[in-house]
Image (tube, rainbow, N blue to C red):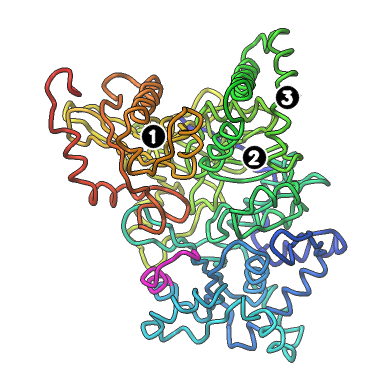
Amino acid sequence: MPESTSPTLATPMPDASICTMLADRLARDPDGVFVERQTALGGAWQQVTVASFVAEVRAVAKGLVAAGVEPGDRVGIMSRTRYEWTLVDFAVWAAGAVGVPVYETSSAEQVRWIASDAGIRLAVVETAAHAAVVAQVRDDLPGLTEVLVLDEDAIGTLVTRGADVADVEIDRRSTHARGADLATIIYTSGTTGRPKGVELTHGNFVELTRNGVEGLGEICAQPHSRTLLFMPLAHVFARFIQVLCVPSGAVLGHTPDTRNLLPDLASFRPTFVLAVPRVFEKVYNSAEQKAGAGAKLKLFRWAAKVAIQYSRALDTPAGPSAGLTAQHRVAGRLVHAKLRAALGGRAEFAISGGAPLGERLGHFYRGIGVRILEGYGLTETTAPTSVNRPGLTKVGTVGPPFPGTSLRVDDEGQIWVKGPHVFRGYRHMPEETAEVLVDGWFRTGDLGTLDDDGYLRITGRSKEIIVTAGGKNVAPAVLEDRLRGHPLVSQVVAVGDQRPFIGALVTLDAEMLPGWLSMHGLPAMDVTTASTHPQVLEALDRAVERANEAVSRAESIRKIRVLTTDFTEANGYLTPSLKVKRAAVLKDFAPVIDELYVDTRPGHGD
């Protein structure tokens, strides 16, 4: 079976922990800037040196000790992405404890399950509303001794409480952990079933981040490297980047409210950003809408086309022609520079993960001067397990194995992963652990192919494969990702298991709808009205035709149904990491799906 390995670039350090990495950073760079934080929404960025950060971490860790937290105890963190999240996380490690992130949007039932399964002893939450959610299930959590609220000065409370704890106690605890010891339990956001607690060790983070610095130093370990986190720190992707900034020296920033994202990007000016594909789709679609109509819209679309053509030409032996290069230079001055400015003006790289980006967007961003390095990983692999490289980026792939990692694709097309970043098991689930950890390899459940250079291409998830009535196996991700690129479209779920053809449920993007209607000379209307409007449906049909160009006729979408309800985290159809809960959609919209197949006569969707 095809297999690819990227050699380890960092000398293994089995006795190292996240705490010892932070101590090493302090020893070599005490006056360097570790974090820049905003003291107020939209305010100036205040530098926090490594020495100041470590001092604050130790003071909070003392408070945790005074609160009765023992080595190995689990501490819950439920908050938006903000400076205090990172501070508490490192303080938990300094106290010898284990951090358990909880999405700030979690329901009381989700909190109950995570806190119970993990055995959380103390919880730090952001707001009184979060505390109220925990309070709903507090009687079911006898092991939870205290809930502290960040907005009610939880940090100050802990610092005051720990004033009498001796420094030597924090020294003892922070040097006690070894690579094999548990660092965190991250509960999968769960597109199906109850979330599983993924146990990640200090060694998982240490080996992955140190290899990241050696293999991707051009991105994250330059003197000017800086990144702004806006993805949830409860997600493993952002958590990995947070820890990566310790050995890499990159400056870390946080923004808790994505509604203020563009102004924060403009003021922080990151050199690399990380996001899921939906964010990059939104930036593109918003930019197109802001171009307006008429000549300005034509200019934008011409510049976008030139960017894509230029990027594609970079992958050919001859490279871009002189004429295309000249057009690219003009488009860069007129349009591309403004688009780069939307990301802060200094962004050289963007890391995309969580779902396939799509080749069109990948080429577009590379063409405007922002190299999106698409990667792939899971909670079970401490985030990245493959990623494209600055020196050789293959748009449409998720790159070669991360340094120190091996990838294998078996005869059924399933992807297996091996490396020091692979988790040690699911909490309290030995049978499920044994199913996915086999002879040192982790069975991901995803499907893909490896090319001759060892670059991985994701083709779908084995659990999501649709088998039509004609026996055709269809991976829905390709169709869904292409169709979701249309500015009108918010979410797509392809259907057709044991049916005569592939159909799709489509939801409309309420934010993009007004601008699209205006651009097309249509009156304002709500999503419900738009879902049946002839010109909206015609536009979606054309988008379906373009999406179908990527697949065979047997795999193509024949019919769509536009829903009046979007899939959101609030209504239970999206996970906090913006993945569709396919099983929930298929169950709740079963009557709508049935309607797609009412008329299957020739010429009517056969």
Q: Quadrant of the N terminus?
A: top left
What's the mark number on residue 334?
A: 3
Q: Position of residue 45 (x, y in %)?
A: 78, 59
Quadrant in which the C terminus is drawn: top left
Q: Residue at x 42, y 71 (%)?
A: 111
| Label 1 neighbour load within 10 Å: few <14, some 14-19, many 20+ | many
Q: Label 1 belongs to which residue?
A: 480
Instruction: Point out the stretch of residues depicted in magenta.
Output: 103-114
Residue placed at 70% from the left, 14% from the top? 327
Instruction: From the viewer's perspective, tell me whether residue 470 is left or right of residue 225.
Output: left
Inter-mark Cα distance, 3 to 1: 32 Å
Q: Amino acid at mark 3?
A: Leu
Q: Position of residue 342 (x, y in %)?
A: 68, 40
The residue carrying mark 2 is: 350
Confirm whether the magenta stretch covers residue 561: no
Label 3 secondary element: helix
Residue type of the residue flagged with mark 1: Glu
Q: Is residue 342 above or below residue 227?
A: above
- In the picture, measured across the screen, residue 456 lies left or right of residue 393, that is left
